[in-house]
């Protein structure tokens, strides 16, 4: 005879005797097998969780160790951005890309420090030059008539002049004065611009006044002025000038135009 029990939960045992034709079906308890599977599953789950946790902390420590030099470089970069070009850089013993980045950052730091120092010197020199040009401008302008009305005690004459140099100083000039009812005036321009032209302009203005004290003839004034300026003129600078002498009594004007 064959005994059949629910096969999903039954173990079948066959008779060891060859002359028997029966099968013994024994129902085993399923609860113990299910509990064993649960325990094995929990153990496996615990092992997987433990491995994941260990992997997480190992990766975190590794990433922190690798990124720590980058954080230190970022801190040094902030100090350099605030103008501390001598800020200390972190010491990196590894010979990887971070070490190359640190060396490149050190080279950039040194270049910035050198450029800043050079810029300071250039700025100081420029400020000094601008100050000297400002003084030269003031001196040049003080040599020209600037008080108006120029002759407040006279009602038969009104005269006005102004120079506006293209640069801080230049070679444009004008001058006028009255001597023995004679109005001497000139308008001139020196070749070139800047400091050299301003120096020639000052010399021309002084020569005009000095020579006019000895002669009232514009032709003679221009001739003497030309000889004085041509003497030892190694730079080859020249002056164009219009020079006139007005007799305030008769209204007669004599003038000389020297290429102006």
Image (tube, rainbow, N blue to C red):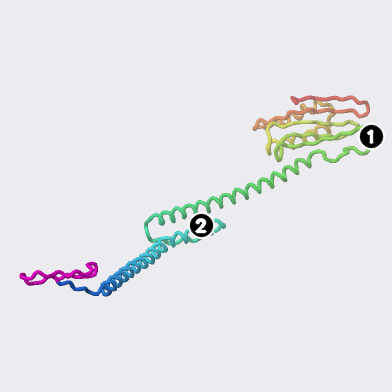
**Residue 7 on the magenta segment:** yes
Q: Which residue is mark 1?
A: 155
Question: Which is more N-terminal, label 1 or label 2?
Answer: 2
Cβ–Cβ below 8 Å for labels 2 and 1? no
Taking 161 as reference, is 25 left or right?
Answer: left
Q: Residue at x 66, y 48 (%)?
A: 128
Q: Nearer the viewer, residue 162 or 229?
A: 162
Q: Residue at x 37, y 56 (%)?
A: 96
Q: Residues within 10 Å of mark 2 (few under 14, many from 20)?
A: some
Residue 37 in the image, given as x and y percentages of width and height: 28, 70
Q: Quadrant of residue 41?
A: bottom left
Q: Is residue 210 above or below residue 42?
A: above
Q: Residue furthest front?
A: 1
Residue 196 in the image, given as x and y percentages of width and height: 68, 37
Q: Which residue is mark 2?
A: 77
Q: Residues within 10 Å of mark 1 (few under 14, many from 20)?
A: few
**Residue 126 on the magenta segment:** no
Taking 115 as reference, is 2 left or right?
Answer: left
Magenta stretch bounds: 1-23
Q: Nearer the viewer, residue 237 or 42?
A: 42
For label 2, the SS is helix
Q: Quadrant of the C terminus?
A: top right
Residue 216 in the image, given as x and y percentages of width and height: 85, 28
Q: Nearer the viewer, residue 182 or 228?
A: 182
Taking 34 as reference, is 65 left or right?
Answer: right
Look at the magenta stretch and give its main secondary structure: loop
Q: Nearer the viewer, mark 2 or mark 1?
A: 2
Taking 149 as reference, is 241 left or right?
Answer: left
Q: Residue at x 19, y 73 (%)?
A: 26
Q: Nearer the viewer, residue 19 or 87?
A: 19
């Amino acid at each position: 005879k064959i005994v059949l029990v629910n096969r999903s939960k039954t173990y079948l045992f066959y008779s060891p005797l060859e002359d028997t034709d029966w099968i013994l079906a024994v129902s085993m308890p399923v609860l113990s097998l299910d509990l064993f599977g649960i325990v094995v599953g929990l153990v496996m789950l615990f092992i997987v969780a433990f491995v994941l946790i260990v992997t997480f902390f190992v990766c975190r420590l590794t990433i922190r160790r690798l990124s720590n030099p980058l954080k230190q470089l970022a801190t040094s970069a902030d100090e350099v951005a605030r103008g501390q070009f001598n800020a200390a850089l972190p010491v990196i013993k590894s010979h990887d890309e971070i070490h190359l980045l640190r060396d490149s950052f050190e080279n950039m730091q040194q270049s910035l420090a050198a450029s800043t120092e050079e810029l300071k010197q250039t700025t100081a020199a420029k400020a000094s030059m601008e100050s000297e040009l400002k003084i030269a401008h003031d001196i040049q302008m003080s040599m020209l008539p600037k008080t108006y009305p120029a002759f407040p005690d006279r009602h038969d004459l009104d005269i006005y002049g102004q120079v506006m140099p293209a640069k801080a100083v230049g070679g444009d000039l004008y001058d006028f004065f009255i001597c023995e009812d004679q109005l001497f005036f000139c308008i001139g321009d020196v070749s070139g611009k800047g400091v050299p032209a301003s120096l020639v302009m000052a010399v021309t203005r002084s020569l005009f006044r000095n020579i006019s004290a000895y002669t009232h003839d514009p032709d003679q004034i221009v001739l003497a002025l030309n000889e004085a300026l041509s003497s030892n003129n190694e730079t080859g600078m020249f002056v164009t000038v219009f020079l006139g002498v007005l007799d305030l009594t008769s209204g007669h004007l004599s003038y000389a135009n020297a290429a102006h």
